[in-house]
Image: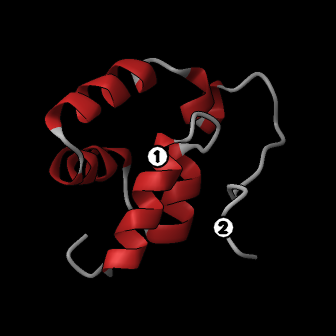
């Protein structure tokens, strides 16, 4: 996690904030496990924003690929360049 640039940290935060981006997609692109993503979010978000995010993502099936009821999904948000 220490080797990420500021731009990569911003991208991880953006991906983690999106409801449909899975932790698996973040792991594949950045090599971060869900616990590391949570620590990164705690460090880089305001405490109230972090609490809102955790409340939203806790138990959410769409954040975990194996819990999804659908197989397809996108890896990139609309603002990410290809």
Q: Quadrant of residue 46?
A: top left
Q: Which residue is mark 1?
A: 16
Q: Quadrant of residue 28?
A: bottom right
Horizontal relation, residue 82 to residue 46: left or right = right
Horizontal relation, residue 20 to residue 35: left or right = right
Q: Residues within 10 Å of mark 1 (few under 14, many from 20)?
A: many
Residue 32, position in %: x, y?
Answer: 38, 60
Residue 44, position in %: x, y?
Answer: 22, 54
Q: Nearer the viewer, residue 63 or 77?
A: 77
Q: Quadrant of residue 61?
A: top right
Q: Residue at x 47, y 64 (%)?
A: 11
Q: Residue at x 55, y 34 (%)?
A: 63
Q: Secondary structure at mark 1?
A: helix
Q: CA distance from mark 1 to mark 2?
A: 14 Å
Q: Is residue 30 above or below residue 56?
A: below
Q: Which residue is mark 2?
A: 80
The N terminus lies in quadrant: bottom left
Horizontal relation, residue 68 to residue 59: left or right = right
Residue 20, position in %: x, y?
Answer: 64, 37
Q: Is residue 67 above or below residue 41?
A: above
Q: Is residue 34 above or below residue 40?
A: above
Horizontal relation, residue 51 to residue 16: left or right = left
């Amino acid at each position: 996690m220490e080797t990420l640039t500021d731009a990569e940290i911003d991208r991880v935060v953006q991906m983690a904030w999106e409801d449909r981006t899975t932790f698996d997609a973040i792991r594949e692109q950045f090599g971060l496990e869900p616990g590391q993503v949570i620590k990164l979010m705690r460090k880089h978000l305001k405490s109230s924003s972090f609490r809102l995010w955790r409340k939203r993502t806790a138990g959410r099936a769409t954040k975990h690929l194996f819990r999804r009821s659908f197989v397809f999904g996108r890896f990139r948000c609309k603002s990410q360049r290809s």
